[in-house]
Image (cartoon, helix red, strand yellow):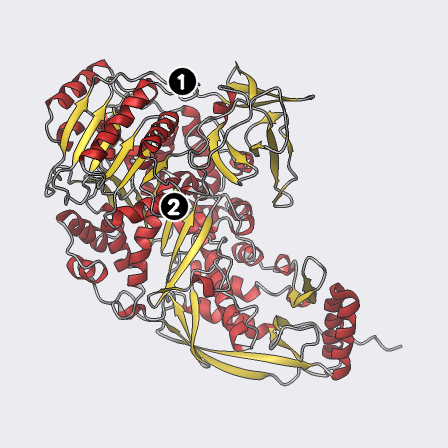
Amino acid sequence: MSNPKQQRRYIFGRVFFPGEVKPDLDEVRLQPLGDHVGNVMRLVKQWQDFPCDDSPQRVLKAAKLHDMGKPQRFGIQVKTDKEGKFKNYTYSFRGHRFLANSEDNWAQTLARGHHDFSVAEVTKDAYQLKKDSAYAFILNQNPLAYAEELYILEMCDQIEAELACRILGDEEQAESRTFMDYTLSNKDDQTYQLDPWPFKQPKLDLAFRYWSKCLSNEEKAKLNELCRNSAPKVGDELDRMVKIWWHTQENNPKAQKKHVTLKPLSQKYLEPQNGETFYQKLAGFSPNPMQEEIFRAIAATKHPAILLKAPTGTGKTESILFPALAKGYRLFLPLPARSLLEDQKERIEKYLLKFSNPDIFPQNKDREISMVVDTGSQMYRWVYKNGEDITATLNINLRRHLYKGDIILTTIDKFLYRYFSFGDKQKSFVFPLRINQPKTLICFDEAHSYDDISFTNFQSLVKALYEAGRSLVLMTATMPPELAERFDYLETMDYTSEFFEEPKRYFEWNERLVCHQEEPGDYRTPDSFQQNFAEIILNEWKYRNQNTKIVAVAESVRDAAAIYQQIKAELRGDTTSESRSLFLYHGRIAEQLRPHLYQAIKQRDDHEQPYIVVTTSAIEVGCDLNAEVLVSQICPPENLIQRVGRCNRRGNVLDAKVVVVGDRIPDFTNSLDQAGWQKYQETLRSLKHFDTQLISQCISRSQQVDDYRVVELFSMLHDYVYSADLTCQPLHQRGLIPTRSWKPSVNFVHIDKGHSISVPIDRLASGQQYADIYAYEKRYNQEKSQWDDEHLLGWGSAYGKEITVRISPEQVDVTLPVYDYDETLGFVEIPKIFVKKWTDGAEEKLLYITGQHKAVISYIKSLDE
């Protein structure tokens, strides 16, 4: 009896569906597995930079075996929409990577890991490799060696894949992936350009072969009929057709071949740029001495580490942005507050549009320059090319950015979150990898803004980045000496008293106005302080014939809202149209409205149109306004300097004025002891013109006491992500990072308006109770990589769940007053939803009751409570 004929192996590397996307396609193209693997190996051989001397041979071995399991796992599938209708064909080699096998355990691990770049997989693999003493030595020398090699393998695989899709006619699969650090564009049918260029040779010639399965009319008709009746089954039918065709071939079919040349887009940074030339080209002005020195330091130093001290309004942002662009760094700009991102985004965008313009920078012709804004709730990527914003023309998921950008704008909280590899489960390790790439510059602006837990995390983060050899700049105008000492390992550039002539501002202190002592959660009605404050603003407005720009800063949202309402009643002007001149801006204005509100203020400021902005400390840091008058409630000296930085910022107002009101600093914002307060009063009384130097000498902050639990938590997360210490993995899985406080934040939402803010959870344990306000929660399901369904707030830890408090006006509860929400005023009052708060050992507990439902939730108590 003869043996049965052995079936032919499916030796396919990739599958392509060229032409129009439809069920009855004309052709299926199959790239030979050996062709694909050979191209990937060729790219690996030409790769320029590896983490270790013996990395090339390990990655090359992995490239050779990374797809050896594909023949056993080949299958064609179909994608359908929510209604079950046909979308497109796709294919799968699911699980093939786990079939890679080699005596070289490192190469085998690379091959098996090459489709999952998650923190869980990368750390698990590195942990297993360290069991071998030779591998442990490599990873102790460079903890990211395995991750960097895995990324190189994946990049070579992805570059080859995108080229193959474009060359073999499947544009649907050829979309640019944010996981890739490279942008591919075609110069012509046979030449493709890659940016940036990671290879040794100035160009590479590659060949792409494919077998073609052309469908008969009968096969097309069958697919069409099946699609009409049951679209999900059409993938199985096409899979059957292709496999039958393959098995009928006695030998491999004749392959068609296409040749392509891969070149760099341009030699981007061949010509050294000096500061004067670059500033003139990009901004049209010459750099000041500070900007010139920073430019030289970043351009000439391999890994600069600088603490930059300079007054507000001296161009610190440009001083970092310009050399980063000139040298080709990926620039990270973590900011202390989300409210600053929109202003910085607009400010930087105008430079990126110009930088991408080939008429000004010829080397950037056809180059994509991109910017990412990442706040967690908002994740967007903008792309600029040839002087235009081309974002809307791109077929990419703009919310999945993976830090693929020339400029990354984010908050310190979200940067810390990404540093520890949270987010985007399958590719999460790309965040720490890109943060730690050699051509990365990380600049922490407004470095003086952190205190307590946020400062503890901040200094731990800066120290870790410094020890890893990253390029760092900390920028500050008012960091107290006690805190600056924590960064004595950085090179200090101090321009606070040199080279800059301080803009002239008349000064007066109205200390007869008595400040009430309002705690943030107290409920009370407007008083004489608010009335007198509003009167001072109105007097300045009328004295200047209602043709001036005034910024007025109160310490609490409730005061700011009351002052705004009194001014509005007096002026009786329109506060909703585009031509309005009166604005209220604070941190409890809905997140959906705040960017547009600031943009309206900024537009009037830029066009020298009159305005009154009543605000809180939300506007004192980083906002680029040039008011003529500042009226500020008395505050600590470091805050006052920041606020004054919004007045006569450009030095072009001849009669600029600063008015400080109030007899004492409210307790909840005070940073001075009695001796410091005495010195501050004496200094304020002595001034006729505002003097930043004299005020800065009054800055004093109590001894920073680091919470040992925060220090230990940072250390354990760092050990897990960067040293593959799996004993710390459970902590990472809990997702706990107290970035500013142990108190978690909740989303406070008005259902009808769709407006929301974020507030610390303990703020909901005091104040006035209102009708029809309910608390809900949902948890993130690690197994399904998605959020579970929402339900009423339940028992347990406040960490690891997303808590939302909703105002539901359509429901009627006559036993309590209705929450009065005015979108112009914002969420002035924070309602009480927890009926009781108490301490239990190291935890704070909150009791929530609604109807028959009851729950107790807990969070970790701060050391100072």
- Residue type, mark 1 in image: Asp
Residue drawn where x is 49% and y is 53% of the image: 399
Residue drawn where x is 51% and y is 58% of the image: 397
Q: Look at the picture and state if 742 lies above or below 73.
A: above
- Looking at the image, residue 5 sits to the left or right of residue 799; the answer is right
- Residue type, mark 2 in image: Ser
Disc on res. 570: none
Residue 478: tell me if it is visible: no
Q: Look at the picture and state if 367 lies above or below 528.
A: below
Q: Look at the picture and state if 339 lies above or below 293.
A: above
Q: Secondary structure at mark 2?
A: loop
Q: Secondary structure at mark 1?
A: loop
Q: Which residue is mark 2?
A: 577
Q: Position of residue 14 (x, y in %)?
A: 60, 70
Q: Position of residue 123 (x, y in %)?
A: 52, 45
Q: Is residue 314 or residue 709 the one in the foreground?
A: 314
Q: Residues within 10 Å of mark 2 (few under 14, many from 20)?
A: few
Q: Indicate which disc, 1 or 2, sits on the residue closer to the N terminus.
A: 2
Q: Residues within 10 Å of mark 1 (few under 14, many from 20)?
A: few
Q: Quadrant of the C terminus?
A: top left
Residue 540: tell me if it is visible: yes
Query: Based on the displayed image, in which of its 4 quarters is residue 478 positioned?
Result: top left
- Looking at the image, residue 519 sits to the left or right of residue 752; the answer is left
Q: Is residue 398 or residue 413 the one in the foreground?
A: 398
Q: Position of residue 473 (x, y in %)?
A: 27, 44
Disc on res. 864: 1
- Looking at the image, residue 736 sits to the left or right of residue 489; the answer is right
Q: Quadrant of the N terminus?
A: bottom right
Q: Nearer the viewer, mark 1 or mark 2?
A: 2
**Discs 1, 2 touching: Cβ within 8 Å:** no
Question: Alpha carbon of mark 1 to alpha carbon of mark 2: how far?
Answer: 46 Å
